[in-house]
Amino acid sequence: EAQVTQNPRYLITVTGKKLTVTCSQNMNHEYMSWYRQDPGLGLRQIYYSMNVEVTDKGDVPEGYKVSRKEKRNFPLILESPSPNQTSLYFCASSLRTSGGIEQFFGPGTRLTVL
Amino acid sequence: EDQVTQSPEALRLQEGESSSLNCSYTVSGLRGLFWYRQDPGKGPEFLFTLYSAGEEKEKERLKATLTKKESFLHITAPKPEDSATYLCAVQRTGANNLFFGTGTRLTVIP
């Protein structure tokens, strides 16, 4: 089954404790991205990657890191989480076509930073 | 600056009562406009891509249309299972990322 998987699905942590949220896709997609979703603000892109070793900032990259060492994986790293990073996070992947980016989303990771 | 505004924020319909959701956008060159459906606690699910003004796409009870300033998602004779949040996003020409609106939360009452 074609899918995007994220782990963990739920995470409660404390300020300053480094964490990684994993994302994996089995569709051989080149393009992957991370979003956060907050009430009233909608989905905002954090980082995206157009291929292995190619990453770029989205609209809200501060406080986050990413890496793309393999095509299927795109982990999101919070080096020193803060309470304002409490949010619902989504990973997405897509084929890059001439028409644009049609993204497939993972199930989400709900992060709480105390 | 790219801007996407969706209206209304929330919409309640009786089963069978057709209506439209609006997505107004401002972007310096549109490469694509995307509609997604999001159920509570789940990731958005891709519905449609529209590329140029005048284009229309249909899927079951949903029909998406596009003009140079806005897109409409028409819902014909909705059913309770159509209840969800509908998200609109744009991709600017030359850009490799999407910019999302805040969505319209649709509730269809039996």
Image (spheres, coloured by chain):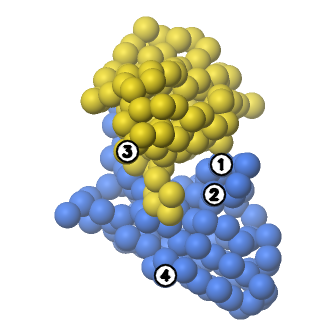
Image side of residue B6 versus residue B84, left or right: right
The kind of secondary structure element at disc 4 is loop
Above or below, A7 against B92 in this view is below
The kind of residue on which mark 2 rests is: Gln
Q: Residues within 10 Å of mark 3 (few under 14, many from 20)?
A: few
The chain letter under disc 4 is A
Q: Earlier in the sequence, mark 4 or mark 1?
A: 4
Above or below, A72 against B9 in this view is below
The kind of residue on which mark 3 rests is: Glu
Quadrant of the image containing the N terminus of chain B: top right
Image side of residue A111 versus residue B52, left or right: right
Instruction: State how many labels appear.
Output: 4
User: Which residue is at the far front?
Assistant: B110
The chain letter under disc 2 is A
- On the image, numbered disc 3 is attached to which residue? B81
Name the spot of residue B22 as percent of width and height, x first.
Answer: 58, 24
Mark-to-mark CA distance, 4 and 1 = 22 Å
Q: Chain drawn blue, letter? A: A
Is circle 3 on the same chain as circle 2?
Answer: no
The chain letter under disc 3 is B
The kind of residue on which mark 4 rests is: Pro
The kind of residue on which mark 1 rests is: Gly
- On the image, numbered disc 2 is attached to which residue? A37
Q: Earlier in the sequence, mark 1 or mark 2?
A: 2
Mark-to-mark CA distance, 3 and 4 = 28 Å
Q: Residues within 10 Å of mark 4 (few under 14, many from 20)?
A: some
Q: Chain drawn yellow, letter? A: B
Q: Are marks 4 and 1 in contact (CB under 8 Å)?
A: no
- On the image, numbered disc 1 is attached to which residue? A42
